[in-house]
Image (cartoon, helix red, strand yellow):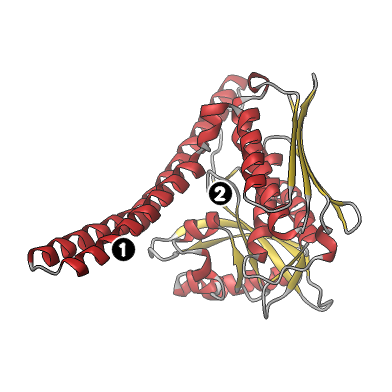
Amino acid sequence: MDAIQPGGPQVRLLDLIEAMRKLRRAACASHPDPGVVTDARGAALAILAPDGTFVSVNRSAAALLGYSSAELVGKSLVELAPDDAHAALADELSASAARDFHSFTAVLTGRTGHPTRLALHQQRVPTKAMDSAVSLTLFEEPLMVEPRSADPVDLLDASERLCQTYLMIGQQKERQRLASELHDGLGQALTLVKLMTEDALMRIRRGQVDDAVQLLDSTVFRIRETIGDVRQICGELRPLMLDKLGLPAALGSLCRRIERGTEAMSVVFDCDVADNDVPEHLKADMFRVAQEALNNAVKHADATEISLSLRGDAARLMLTIQDNGIGYESHPFATDEAYASGLGLIGMQHRVEMHGGAFSIESSATSGTLVCATWTR
């Protein structure tokens, strides 16, 4: 499935998937120093033009920089750096444009103006125009922690401290993201509801009942939107169905909801795994992979049949999503969410492989698309 933004470079989704795999291998090889993915929900990813202009950016990277995804598209990465760092960052971007892979550090201020030192890993991705390319960019926050002793006990303690540092930084980043969403989204929505309710009360006291009724109708609509926002925030932290139903039942419920929400589509769920057989730390990722693949099949594959399977044996767990659609190769995206869909899939790939799993996509116009994620027990 091609990722196309009107007026922008055209990139095949399968090329993005392969670029993510190359990027992770190259980043690990060239930067042995530990890094922290900047958002607890997944990788902070963007697609940049050779001059550093944002072509597309996922929510994790946008939240890191204090913007929405839409606000960053068209903006240059150089604009987010302090004035005295513009030239150095431009040189690094120029170096990236000349290489398949380039990794460097940069200080970015974002909307808040607070400088943050980040590691940027860029992997070149070809476009349909043979003489051009874009860069898949992963944002990470580097950590420099050196053990003080070569003694094995001290090294073990240093490793434990490093893991604790990772955890604390991840928690802090998630707190920052939640605080931003609650303040900028939920807080403003509740303030608006309060003002609209007060306005309606004033109109009632003045005898303007009809105007007050119309205003209260609008207020009820705003409240419903706010409830939806709260549910979305909670769902992004952890899908509620996982805690209420367990993973197999949550996947089955997801399939039924997808089937009910579409016309003339059959969604079949096959599972031979009990909830207790799935490690707790994998459940959310497995659910997200299934959710992303199902949504893409519904939106872009023109499929009439989807099969979701969760199977397990003594050595591994395997999640597969197969559809009978037109495949990634033959169906070009022509919507504004094209690149966002691509970043969504490679974000899932990153999460699978970060837990030691394997992620693959096979796609053609004749056999549809098969998304497969496998984890060892």
The crowd level at tag 1 (other Cα within 10 Å; few <14, some 14-19, many 20+) is some
**Front: mark 2 or 1:** 1
Q: Residue at x 56, y 76 (%)?
A: 74
Q: Position of residue 122 (x, y in %)?
A: 68, 61
Residue 113's disc number: none
Which amino acid is tagged 1?
A: Ser
Q: Secondary structure at mark 1?
A: helix
**Nearest to the observer: residue 13 or residue 321:** 321
Q: Which residue is mark 2?
A: 142
Q: Secondary structure at mark 2?
A: strand
Q: Position of residue 43 (x, y in %)?
A: 60, 50
Q: Which quadrant would residue 217 be assigned to in this image?
A: bottom left
Q: Residue at x 64, y 76 (%)?
A: 51
Q: Residue at x 91, y 56 (%)?
A: 366
Quarter holding the C terminus? top right
Quarter holding the N terminus? bottom right
Q: Which residue is mark 1?
A: 218
Q: How many marks?
A: 2
Q: Position of residue 135 (x, y in %)?
A: 70, 66
Q: Position of residue 196 (x, y in %)?
A: 23, 63
The residues tagged by marks 2 and 1 sit, at their Cα atoms, a distance apart of 47 Å
The crowd level at tag 2 (other Cα within 10 Å; few <14, some 14-19, many 20+) is some
Which amino acid is tagged 2?
A: Pro
* Left or right, 263 with reference to 367: left
Vertical arrangement, residue 201 with respect to residue 352, above or below: below
* Left or right, 126 with reference to 80: right
Q: Is residue 99 visible?
A: no
Vertical arrangement, residue 40 with respect to residue 102, above or below: above
Q: Is residue 301 visible?
A: yes
Vertical arrangement, residue 24 with respect to residue 88, above or below: above
Q: Earlier in the sequence, mark 2 or mark 1?
A: 2
Q: Which quadrant would residue 285 be assigned to in this image?
A: top right
